[in-house]
Image (tube, rainbow, N blue to C red):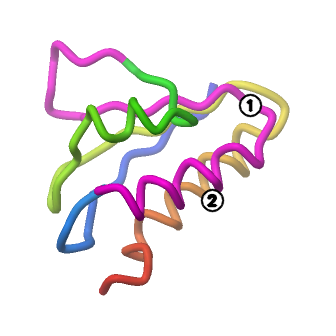
């Protein structure tokens, strides 16, 4: 299992358009991918390839998230998703 933490940087957070981009990217990988809010002790890791998950999380600017990958391409998958979040989805 490979994990990394990052902070949501785009002004509007992970609303529908960036969430859709995130999921489209995540689905390119074979590994099981999950995401969760870092500062929420009650949060469980959820499927990072699900629009319902992403919209339910309602991640806003400044929130920290951890992305976890498990599988053959876990490192590439997690690193790519972290880079996508860090880029601000083109909204910066």
Horizontal side, residue 61 vs residue 1: left or right: left
Could you tell me residue 67's position as x and y percent? 47, 39
- Work out which quarter of the rendered image holds the N terminus and state it: top right
Residue 80 - label? 2
Q: How many angstroms separate mark 2 from mark 1 (CA)?
A: 13 Å
Q: Residue at x 77, y 49 (%)?
A: 28
Camera-side residue of 53 and 34 = 53
**Residue 62, image x, y percentages:** 15, 59
Q: Tell me which residue sits at (30%, 86%) in the image.
A: 92
- Say if 6 sits above or below 41 in the image: below
Task: Find residue 40 and report its horizontal and vertical position in percent.
Answer: 15, 26
Which quadrant would residue 49 be assigned to in this image?
A: top right
Left or right: 14 in relation to 41: right
Is residue 60 highlighted in magenta? Answer: no
Q: Nearer the viewer, residue 49 or 74?
A: 49
- Write the residue at 51% across / 66% down: 84
23 up-or-down from 43: above or below: below
Lateral position of residue 67 relative to residue 36, left or right: right
Sequence order check, earlier mark of 2 and 1: 1
**Snapshot quadrant of residue 87:** bottom left
Residue range in magenta is 15-44
Above or below, 67 against 45 in this view is below
Quadrant of residue 71 within the rendered picture:
top right
> Mark on residue 31?
1
Label 1: state its secondary structure: loop
Q: Which mark is residue 44?
A: none
The residue positioned 62% from the left and 32% from the top of the image is 69
Residue 25 part of the magenta segment: yes
């Amino acid at each position: 299992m490979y994990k990394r933490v990052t902070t949501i940087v785009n002004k509007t957070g992970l609303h529908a358009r960036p969430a859709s981009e995130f999921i489209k990217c995540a689905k390119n990988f074979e590994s099981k991918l999950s995401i969760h809010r870092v500062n929420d002790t009650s949060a469980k890791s959820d499927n990072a390839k699900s629009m319902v998950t992403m919209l339910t999380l309602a991640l806003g600017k400044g929130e920290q998230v951890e992305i976890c990958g498990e599988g053959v391409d876990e490192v590439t998958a997690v690193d790519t998703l972290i880079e996508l979040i860090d880029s601000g989805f083109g909204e910066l």
